[in-house]
Image: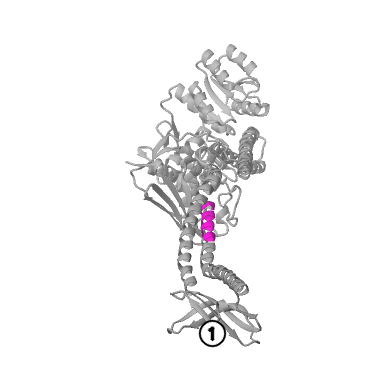
Amino acid sequence: MNVLIIEDEKALAQELEIFLTNYNYICDVCFDGESASEKIAVNLYDFILIDLGLPDYDGLDLLREAKKLDSDAACIILTARTEINDRIKGLDLGADDYLPKPFSLLELQSRMQAIIRRKFGVKNNIVELDGFLIDLTNRTISYYNDVVSTITKKEFDLIAYLILHKNRTLTRMQLSEHIWGNVVNNDYDSNYIDAHIKNIRKKLNAFAPPEWLETVRGLGYKIKINA
Amino acid sequence: MRLRTKLTLFNAISKLVIVVLFVLLVPVLIRNISSNYVDSKLIKQKNKLLQIVKSRGIETYIENGEGYGSYLPLKEEYISLEDVDPDYFSDTIKRGKRSFSEGDTLEYRILSHTFKVKNKNYLLEIGKSVDTLDETSVPLQNIAFQVLLGMILLTILADQFYSNYVLKPLRLIIKTKLVGQKFPNFNSYRKVRTTTTDFEYLDISIHKMVETIADKFQKEREFISNASHELMTPISILQSKIENMFEEEDINDELKVRLIEMQKILNRLKSITKTLLLISQIENEQFLKEDKVSVTDVLQDVYDEISIRLQEKDISYEMDVPQNWQFININKFLLFNLFFNLINNAIKYNNEGGYIKITATAGHNNFIISITDNGIGIPAEALPFIFNRFKKFRQSLQQDSFGLGLPIVKSIAAFHDIEVEVISEKDKGSTFKLIFPATLVMVT
């Protein structure tokens, strides 16, 4: 997958590139609108990540250009400007998603994955883990023929996020940012993740011990999937 | 009491006091005036009589040593002349009683005067009845009282009218510039027309102060908005760097733990910045109020987010809100956060095994939703400050927070014109009452 990163903050652009390269994306990086505009005109991308606050260009104009020249590219707006109108305008202009800064790189990856699933119409998105079947499209967990019906929405979100970032240790902060991201919270403690994991384990244990859901001591949690 | 009422009242009372004093003084005054008048008349009569005696001789009155006496038919006046002992001397005007042969005794103002004619001493007495004098004073008093009362009423009316007129600019200043002004959204400045320089000065001063406050307020808002926006990018960079470093293969677990510490701190910074930004966005009215959602749905959403916290502290949660209540003209995201923060606080400042109750009552033209807990409560001295930013009173708790939960609540409530009332007692618990105007809730 080809990704164009348009971000004038070089340090951030660099981190985006490192992260996405690790996930096997092929990245192009632009620090200004001018060169981005050229790249869009010349190359075909699967993803274009646009920072709205560019020094020489209105990010929304860039979005317009991209949509005109390369209508298959999925555009994700990254911005520190959080004006509600920007979001509406961006989505109106055909942006596929909108991620306000500061965001977690994992969150970006999960949004990109969601777009890929949507674009390619992935229907069968089922992961098998020691007899547990986790259906990411229909959001259900079953053990052989039994559906684990007690799993709540939040708990499923956690499992799905860990599966998406399989074999990678996710910290409690990263997990709570994902599941409580839209709550403007007065406190910054993420201990409730432990409670959620405890509940998940208890519910799954009724069928079989979910050994694939690992606690990484002092760091966080991980779901191990052998390729 | 209003200034105009005070002025009118003072005017009326002071005038009334003066009039009453005057009316009470009237008898004394009249007596004085009339006795002066009578005295001068008596002296004139005396002089006239002495003149006659001088020109025509004492014989005109006294012929053969008998005294002379004369009075009017009703005895209002009398005059007497007789010879007296040569050593007797008198020259006075005073009150006295005189008896007449008919048996009448009347009170007179009497002039006594001795004079000598041909080696004989004579005493002249001229008297004027005082009854006639006293009688006039009562009707006079009445008339004076009535006339003055009438005049007072007239002046009070005039005062009232004038003070009304002259104080009108002040009233206008109070009505248009002070009463019902919602800080910091003042109405635009309109000069109050007045010829009184004091009011002109007051008007301009108030205007200048309001302008300064509004300006400072605007600057503060802009600053918070700009500062939090500017902080977003560096935070984003740091977050990405930490996340990437966490995945580096040559980083050992000890370093990873330290990276997590950094992530925690960064998260704190992020939460504060995001919250400040949200508050500034609310205050700058960057949210729409067009959503319509059932009250129980919002509360259920909050419950879904928060149930894990209730479970952790074994807190019972009771919700008694009518199914048919609907929020209208609100922002769903903001109301969610309003309830989230209040209920989250109710959990945070609760004891293990405590309870939280959410109740609803429909008032006369409002709807009240109350969130009650039996937690640690708020000490009375802290109550006035709980909505201030970065104020933390319940420090002893192990949970971290940065004192922005209630400021968010306050901003969201103010944005929607929701009134927040807090009743709290230390160690007993708190109740946060949200009073929604009728325009925000619809019963279906």
Colour scheme of the rendered structure = one colour
Q: Is residue B4 magenta?
A: yes
According to the picture, the residue beneath numbered tag 1 turns out to be: B66
Is there any visible trace of residue B383 in the rendered image?
Answer: yes
Comparing B106 with B62, the one in front is B62
**Looking at the magenta stretch, what is its main secondary structure?**
helix
Q: Is residue B373 magenta?
A: no
Q: As drawn, is B234 to the left or to the right of B75?
A: right
- In this picture, which residue range is highlighted in magenta? B3-15
Which element type, helix, strand or loop, lies under badge 1? loop
Q: As drawn, is B253 to the left or to the right of B64?
A: right
Is there any visible trace of residue A190 in the rendered image?
Answer: no
Q: Report x, y in % for residue B85.
A: 62, 88
Q: Report x, y in % for residue B44.
A: 59, 69
Q: Residues within 10 Å of mark 1 (few under 14, many from 20)?
A: few
> Which residue sits at x=59%, y=57%?
B396
Amino acid on which disc 1 is placed: Glu
